Image: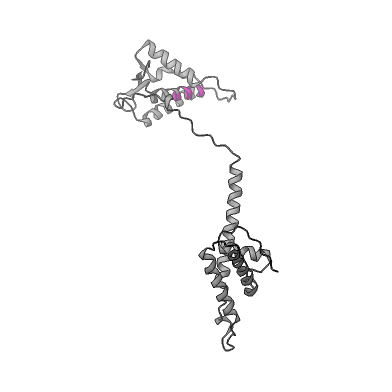
Amino acid sequence: MYEVKLDAFNGPLDLLLHLIHKYEIDIYDIPMKALTEQYMNYIHAMKQLEINIASEYLVVASELLMIKSKMLLPQQPDLEDEDLDDPREDLVGRLIEYQNYKEYTEFLNEMKVQREQYYSKHPTDLSHLETAELWDENHTIDLTELIMAYQRIKTRASFDTPRQVTIQKETFTIEQASTQVSERLAKATSFNFFSLFTFKETTEHVVTHFLAILELSKSGIIQITQDKEFADINITRGVNYGA
């Protein structure tokens, strides 16, 4: 007596692949008689158990019977080999495509399981730390002019700087330079940019002051003005000074 084991299959192609793997059938050279018999045994078993058979299973069953019938027909000897179409070709192509989808699905499921081992932190809301900065666009100078002034200070400072390189950690910070600028503005409402230097400072000192002025100007604490091209640069209190 033939025994059929019923499993849960995702459609007729899934059942066909199960039978092919179970009975070690070559998917590229399917013996249609054996495969059709195994498939029909499954259909009959479902009927005996009074299980509703989906129409797609019956469609594939009829297709298998048709392919089996075509392969039983005698071949015409006068036709060349390349003119003979294999009736199994379409079924084999669909089975291979479905098998690839199953393998990809298993691979993606494995990746999903691995990803579930990680915990992703949601972005933190920092909107309450934002501050509205006031900015006056009518009294600003072009960034190119500020860079040119920096180059002039750097060139003049290099004349009195000894030609000796000393590697050491940072000793003069942007915060210190910003404090010096703020102290100058506390004593006077404005001062000349070049008055910050004696032209004997190190390059580090000059660059740090330059960066501090850029930061203070960006935040609106100071305002930078220039009467004409290549003229001295004046630093005055900005709209956010003392805020």
Q: Residue at x 54, y 69 (%)?
A: 60
Quarter of the image containing the C terminus? top left
Q: Position of residue 171 (x, y in %)?
A: 55, 19
**Is residue 208 one of those drawn in magenta?**
yes
- Can you tell which quarter of the image residue 85 is in? bottom right
Q: Is residue 29 in view?
A: no
Asked whether, in this view, residue 23 is left or right of residue 136, the answer is: right
Residue 63 vs residue 171, the one in the foreground: 63
Q: Position of residue 145 (x, y in %)?
A: 36, 29
Q: How many marks?
A: 0
Residue 81 vs residue 206, the one in the foreground: 81
The colour scheme applied to this rendered structure is: one colour
Is the stretch drawn in magenta largely helix, strand or loop? helix
- Can you tell which quarter of the image residue 182 is in? top left
**Is residue 139 one of those drawn in magenta?**
no
Q: Residue furthest top?
A: 187
Asked whether, in this view, residue 239 is left or right of residue 214, the answer is: left
Q: Position of residue 77 (x, y in %)?
A: 59, 88
Q: Position of residue 203 (x, y in %)?
A: 50, 24
User: What stretch of residues is rendered in magenta?
Assistant: 202-211
- Can you tell which quarter of the image residue 129 is in? top left
Quarter of the image containing the N terminus? bottom right
Q: Residue at x 31, y 27 (%)?
A: 137
Residue 153 vs residue 75, the one in the foreground: 75
Q: Is residue 187 in view?
A: yes
Q: Residue at x 48, y 19 (%)?
A: 175
Q: Residue furthest right?
A: 1
Residue 71 vs residue 78, the one in the foreground: 71
